Amino acid sequence: MKRVLIILAIIAVIILVMWLGFQVKPQHFKALAQPQPEMETMEIPQGLPKPVENFYRSVYGEKASIINSVVIIGHGRVRQFGIWLPTRFAMIHNAGKDYRHYFEATFFGIPVLKINEGYIDGQSFFESPMGTYYNDANSNQGANLALWAEGAWFPSLWISDPRAHWQAIDDTTTALFVPYEKSEENFIVRFNPQSGLIDLMEVMRYRSPGDTDKVLWLTNEVKLADGSAVSYATWLDDGKPWAEFVIDDVRFNLDVSDLIRARGWQE
């Protein structure tokens, strides 16, 4: 009996240490030192569906910023193996064309899992201790959708890039069409009737290499009382988010030609 109690006590201590380790938030990546160049602007286009026009005027006013590249640094959580892992990340976009993500999941603030993934020149890549693959057809489709979905952080992309276009559905819902290879994919975008901002984006996406069926993928953002916001990504059949992201720093229109093809994060 005494031996059993000792074993149970050791297990309890291990569980407590594991739990504590995953409560410690990682130190954020340092922001880039390059100054942000002056932003050019464009008029909000005529003929947009009414909820889309209301959205852009709520976000930008009469003129929207023209975004060519974005570097986003932030923190959050990613759910792996049923466990929420505290994470810091860097996301680099050549807007509407390419992107790279770098994630570090941490334990007591120490990186224990590093992932590089992206979509460059129409080909996806995923590099991690769990597996590595390149230019997988399913992943290409999903990565292209991520490329455009993350435009929610710089939504002028959806009106400045002529390959993207909107179609009205009803007073609070539209379809956003984006290019993919020689065809198009489309998101359903739902707007809040009071604020005019986006409540939800949804699209059919392949989740993993080898999958034969797509799953409805949902993204949304929730404003917090302190003025910050948390962005969520959810697979419908899972029923709860698998990722939470908070932006700590964002820089627009820097030269990202080297950074987007690098690995890791150079501080």
Image (tube, grey):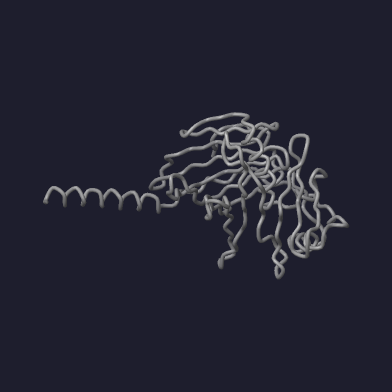
Report the side of 51 relative to 150 (left or right). Answer: right
Outermost residue toward the right? 46
Of 37 and 137, which appears nearest the observer? Answer: 137
Image coordinates for residue 244, horizontal then vertical, percent: 54, 53
Out of 43 and 220, give the one closest to the viewer. Answer: 220
Say above or below: 134 vs 11.
Answer: above
Counting from the top left corner in percent of width and height, residue 61 is at 79, 62
Position of 75 compared to 53: left or right? Answer: left
Residue 234, image x and y in percent?
Answer: 57, 52
Q: How many marks?
A: 0
Give the left or right position of residue 163, taking residue 240 as reference.
right
Task: Name the residue at 73% across, 65% down.
Answer: 196
Dividing the picture into quarters, in which one does residue 116 lie?
top right
| Lateral position of residue 225 relative to residue 163, left or right | left
Outermost residue, front side: 212
Identify the residue shown where x is 83% and y is 52%: 42
Residue 222: % across, % down: 59, 61
